[in-house]
Amino acid sequence: MNKSKSSVRIILGMVVLLLGLSSWAAPLDEETKAFLKRRAPGVLAAIEMHEGEELEEARERGIELREMFLEEKEEHGEEWAEVLVGLENVEAEIEVLAWRFREDKIGEDEGEVGLLRLLKKQIALQNKMDRWEMKLFPEAADEIEEELDWRLKNPEVALRERFRETLEDFGFVEEEDEEEEMEAEEVSGPVYTPAPKDEGEENDELHGITFNYEKEIRPILEEHCFDCHDNASAKGDIDLESALTQTPLVRNRLLWENVAERVKMGDMPPKKKPQPADSDRLKLRAWLAAEIEGFDYSKVRNPGYVPVRRLTREEYNRTIRDLVGLDLRPADDFSMDFSGTSGFSNSANTLFLQTAHLDRYFTAAEGVIDEVRADKKAWSYLAGNPEDAVGAVERFMRRAHRRPPTDSEIKEITDRYEVALKTTKFQSDALALAFKTILVSPKFLLRVEEAAENGKDQVVSDSDFATRLSYFLWASTPDDKLLNAAAAGKLSNSASRQAQIKRMLADPRSLSLGEIFAAEWLSTDDVGPRIRKDPIDNPWCTESLMAAMRAETAYFFHSLVMDNAPVARLIDSDYTFLNAELARHYRIEGVEGSAMRRVKLETNQRGGVFGQASVLATTSFPDRTSPVVRGKWILDTLLGTPPPPAPPDVPEIEVKGGGRRAATSLRQKLEVHRESPRCAGCHAQIDPLGFGLESYAEFGQWRGGIDDRGTLPSGAKFRGPAGLKLALIDERLDDLGSQAIRKMLAYALGRQLEFYDEATVKEIAAKLKSTGYRFGDLVLAITESYPFTMKRLPPASPGQSDEE
C-alpha cells in the first residue's frame, strides 16, 4: 500500500541502525538523553551497544528522533508524536534483540518469545498510526482502512507474516527452513489419493465360523491380553476380563470394536510383547465379528424408558414464547443445564427438579404474566373474551399442559380464580393469578407421559407423541394444529404424522435443530460463552462476530434438513451462511448487512463444517491450533469412533508461540511422538485428520503455506481440507451416517442410547444408506422408529434388567 504522502513514512523507513549517515554526530546532550530514556529506551539501548562510526550514526539518529517528536507534537499533537516515537523505539528494541541473539546472550526460545512480543506491540502501534493517518490523509483513507481492517481481523496471520519478514530481514531464516516453506507452498498433485484396494477382502473369512470360547478364544486372551487388561491391571482403563462378564458383548460395543481394530492393525499386543499367530488373530477377529456385528438385536428389542424430567432452560424459554407470544427468555436467569450422558442438555438423567429451581419458577411466572399484562396485544391474545374466564383458563391449560385438561384440573384453577376475584378490584388480576398458577404447575414444568402397563411395550398415546415430536423439532410445546391432530387420534396414522412433520419442519421454529441439536452435537454452542479471545488484545473478536459464527453452523445444519441433503454435505458443501462481519472474517467479498444469508462459495476453503469458525475455534486451544484436538474431534464427534484415552504417564506435547512456525514445530514433535509404540496406534488415526485442517487458524482464519498433508492408516493420502473431505466421504461415509443417526436419535428421545438401541440405528442406516443418509429422511425415520413410538415402564428395582 502506498502511503508516500505521509512525511512520517520517510522517517519511519529509517531503521534505528540505518547506515549511510556519515556526517559527524555530536555526543548526546542531557535533554536528548532524558527524552530517549523516557520515551524511547530501546533507541538509547541501541546507541549504547555500538562503538566507533556506528556509535556516531546512532547518536545522530537519537537527536533526529527528538527533533521529529517536537515537530510532530506541535503540528498534530502529542498522542500522534508518541505513536511515531513508539514505532521507532520498537524497531530499536528488535535490533537490540537481534544483536543479543547473534552474540549468544540469549537462546532461540527466548529470542522467539521476545520477538513475538515486540511484533505484537509494533502491530498495535501501527494500527493506532493508521487510524491517525486516515484522519490526516483522507484521500488515502480507504486504502489504509482496508489494510487496517485485515490486520484486525487476522491478527495471527499478520503476526506470522511480520515474524517471517523480520527473520528474513536479519538473515535468520535457515536454508533448510526456506526449503521446507517452499515445499509446503509448492505441494501439488491430487488432493486425494485413495488407498490401494485389497483384491481379496478377508472379511469373508470372518463370518460363518463358530468357535468354542472356553477352549479356543479365552486361552488367546489369557496369553496375550490379560497381563495388561485384566481387572487387576486394566492399563489405559481397559479391563477386558470384566468386560467379558457383561453379556451380551454389544453392551460395550465401542470397546470391542476398538479391540478388533487393534488386533487387525497389529497394534495389540504391543510389539515388545510375544505376538499371537496369524491364525489366532483371525480367530479373535472372527469371534468378535460374530459377537458384535452378527448379534441378533431382536433378542433384546426394547424402546427404553424416559423418566419424568423438567424442561431445559432453552425449552422453557421457547415454550413461554409460544404460549404468550413474547420472546421474554426468563430461563436465562436459571442455573445452567448440564449435558447428560447422551451429550445433550435435554438428557433426562440430568433434568431433576430440585428445591433450588422452585424460587426461580415462581419468579419467572410472576415476571412473564406481568410482562404480558403490560403488552395489550399479548394480554388480549392470552385472556380472550373478558367474560369467559373459564374458557381462557382452559385454553391456556391445554397448551401449557400439552394435552386437554381434565374437568377436575380446570375446576381447581377456576376455583382459585373465583376466590381471587372476591379480593381484587380487577378481573384481570384474578385471571393473571390463574395463569401464574398454571405456570408453576408440575404439569407445565415437567414432561410426564401417561403410565405404561408394567412389563409390556405399548404405543405412545397421541398426546404424548405430539409432545415428543414438538420438543424434538421445535424444542417447544405443541401448537394448536398438532394438539388438534392428537385429540382427533390422527397421530396414530403414519401418513398424518408425516404431514404434521413436514408442516413443522417448514415452520421457522424448526431452526432449533441447528441452534440446539447441531450446536450441542458439534459443541459450537461453547463459542462465546466459554471459547473466546481476549477482547483487549483482539478487538476484532466481538460478541456479534461470535454470534454469527454460531449462527452459521445453526443455519447450515437446518438447511441440510430442509434440503433433505445427504450426510456428505455436512462436511463438503458449496455454500454457507454469512453476514457482513463473518464474511470479512473469512475475507469473502460481496456480503452486506447483519442478517445471515445463504452464500454460494467460490472456493473449497469454507464448504461444510470443517471450514466454519465455530467448529475450528471449538477444536483449538485459546492461542493456537491443535491437530490432536481436531483429529480426536473428527473421530469422536463426527464419526463416533473415539480413540482410547492416552496412557496416564505420557507427557503433554509442549509448543511455544503460534502461527506457521508453531504448526511446523508441532508436526515434527507429533512425528516423534508417533515413534513411541504406546502412542503410534492412536496417533496414526488422530494426527493425519488434524493436519488436514492446519491451514485454519484457531478462530477459523485461513493461513496458507502450512503443510496440511496427511496419510490415513489405510494408506490413503490427502492434502488440505478438500482432500480430507474426499478421504472421509470415500472411506468413512457409513461411520458418518451412523453417527448422525445415533446423535439425532439420542436427542429426539432425550436420553442416552443403550446397547439395545443399536437395533434401531442399524434399521435406519439400512433404509437410508442407498440415498446417502439424507437428513430429512432421517428425521422421518426417527419419528417412525420403535423407541420413538413405543414406551416401557422403568425396571421395578435396580437389579432388574431392561430386557426383562
Image (cartoon, grey):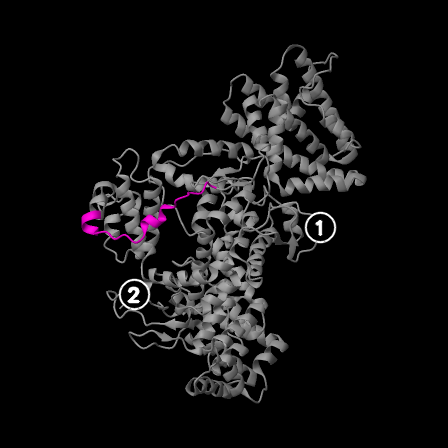
Q: Is residue 218 above or below residue 766?
A: above
Look at the numbered disc 1 and give the secondary structure of its residue: loop
Give, as a single range, the part of the protein colored magenta.
Answer: 195-216
Q: Are marks 1 and 2 in contact (CB under 8 Å)?
A: no
Figure quadrant of residue 767: bottom left
Q: Name the outermost residue toward the front.
A: 200
Q: Nearer the viewer, residue 282 or 573?
A: 282
Q: Which residue is mark 2?
A: 299
Whether residue 433 is visible to the viewer of this picture, yes or no, is: no
Image check: 59 left or right of 397?
A: right
Q: Position of residue 588 (x, y in %)?
A: 67, 47
Q: Position of residue 319 (x, y in %)?
A: 51, 71
Q: Nearer the viewer, residue 341 or 98?
A: 341
- The amino acid at mark 2 is Lys
Q: Is residue 475 above or below residue 724?
A: below
Q: In whole angstroms, how far apart are the C-alphas of marks 1 and 2?
A: 58 Å
Q: Which residue is mark 1?
A: 590
Q: Position of residue 266 (x, y in %)?
A: 33, 39
Q: Nearer the viewer, residue 537 or 149?
A: 149
Q: Position of residue 426 (x, y in %)?
A: 56, 85
Q: Is residue 471 above or below residue 89?
A: below
Look at the numbered disc 2 and give the secondary structure of its residue: helix
At x 58% / y 23%, what residue is drawn?
Answer: 173
Whether residue 99 is visible to the viewer of this picture, yes or no, is: yes
